[in-house]
Image (cartoon, rainbow, N blue to C red):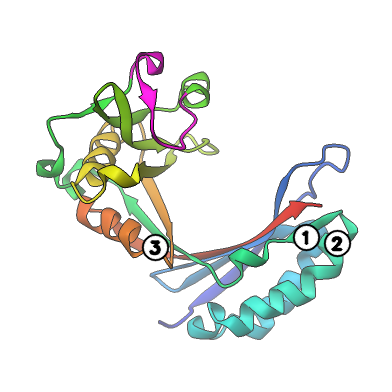
């Protein structure tokens, strides 16, 4: 792929008086049309520009160990001065970015009879790591599979930052995998979300072939790749 152009958007630094547990001082996305969008904090704009000067001319180098090593090395002093440390476990882990924009994108035949939109979460045990109480409190919708009175597979909305776009994620309890529950719930949830949103996003790790397969089977289209420098408070 040829990178046609790149843009850098710098946002105001996070409020120093509010110490967040997780910060993302740099993230970038390369879309399938060759556009590279880079986001950073205003105080790290110079670092982001240096990164672009070094790597924005080659999509293979952009997602290489060389690029990730550069980011971790060059950002180390800055994030350390904030009282944070980069997450070493995520070094080299980038994301596939998928989207669905219309119901016609979806394979509705994959929706199982036992997939349903979650109503009162208190009626069921929860065998996933999703926080169903938080989902309900924030009015984030979920499609679930219930077995023997427990939620064993779920597709749910993530926190919304854009009314026109919704990002979703999914999980199935290990004892219930390989039965089509995840893709069923993803298709059902996406169908409902597309009634109110222009598009639905699904992101997964480059190391998670199973999750990538769920997106592709459901009918999502890959729109790019992205990388986040994730830092945690010390």
Magenta stretch: residue 169 in it? no
SS state under label 3: loop
Looking at the picture, how far across and down is residue 143, in whole percent?
Answer: 30, 31
Residue stretch rendered in magenta on the structure: 119-132
| Mark with earlier residue (2, 3) | 2
* Residue 10 visible in the picture: no
Q: Is residue 203 left or right of residue 81?
A: left
Mark linked to residue 80: 2
SS state under label 1: strand
Quarter assignment of residue 195: top left
Task: Give the class, few, some or many, for how many residues have Cα within 10 Å of label 1's Cα (few <14, many ≥20).
Answer: many
SS state under label 2: helix
Label 1 belongs to which residue?
A: 85
Q: CA distance from mark 2 to mark 1?
A: 6 Å
Q: Residue at x 43, y 40 (%)?
A: 166
Task: Give the class, few, some or many, for how many residues have Cα within 10 Å of label 2's Cα (few <14, many ≥20).
Answer: some
Magenta stretch: residue 120 in it? yes
Location of residue 192 with respect to 228 vertically, above or below: above
Q: Answer whether labels 2 and 1 touch (C-beta < 8 Å).
A: yes
Q: Residue at x 53, y 25 (%)?
A: 134
Label 3 belongs to which residue?
A: 208
Looking at the picture, how far across and down is residue 212, in whole percent?
Answer: 33, 60
């Amino acid at each position: 792929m040829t990178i046609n152009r790149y843009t850098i958007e710098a946002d105001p630094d996070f409020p120093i008086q509010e110490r967040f547990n997780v910060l993302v001082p740099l993230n970038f996305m390369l879309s399938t049309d060759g556009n590279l969008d880079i986001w950073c904090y205003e105080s790290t704009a110079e670092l982001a520009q240096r990164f672009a000067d070094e790597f924005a001319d080659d999509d293979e180098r952009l997602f290489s160990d060389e690029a990730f090593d550069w980011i971790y090395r060059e950002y180390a002093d800055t994030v350390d001065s904030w009282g944070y440390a980069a997450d070493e476990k995520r070094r080299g882990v980038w994301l596939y970015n998928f989207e669905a924009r219309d119901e016609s994108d979806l394979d509705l035949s994959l929706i199982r009879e036992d997939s349903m939109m979650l109503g009162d979460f208190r009626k069921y045990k929860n065998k996933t790591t999703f926080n169903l109480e938080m989902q309900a409190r924030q009015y984030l919708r979920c499609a679930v599979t219930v077995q023997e009175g427990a939620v064993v597979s779920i597709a749910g909305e993530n926190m919304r930052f854009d009314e026109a776009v919704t990002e979703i994620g999914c999980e199935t309890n290990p004892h219930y995998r390989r039965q089509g529950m995840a893709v069923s719930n993803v298709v059902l949830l996406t169908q409902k979300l597309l009634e109110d949103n222009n598009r639905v996003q699904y992101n997964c790790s480059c190391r998670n072939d199973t999750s990538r397969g769920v997106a592709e089977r459901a009918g999502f289209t890959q729109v790019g790749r992205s990388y986040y420098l994730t830092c945690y408070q010390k």
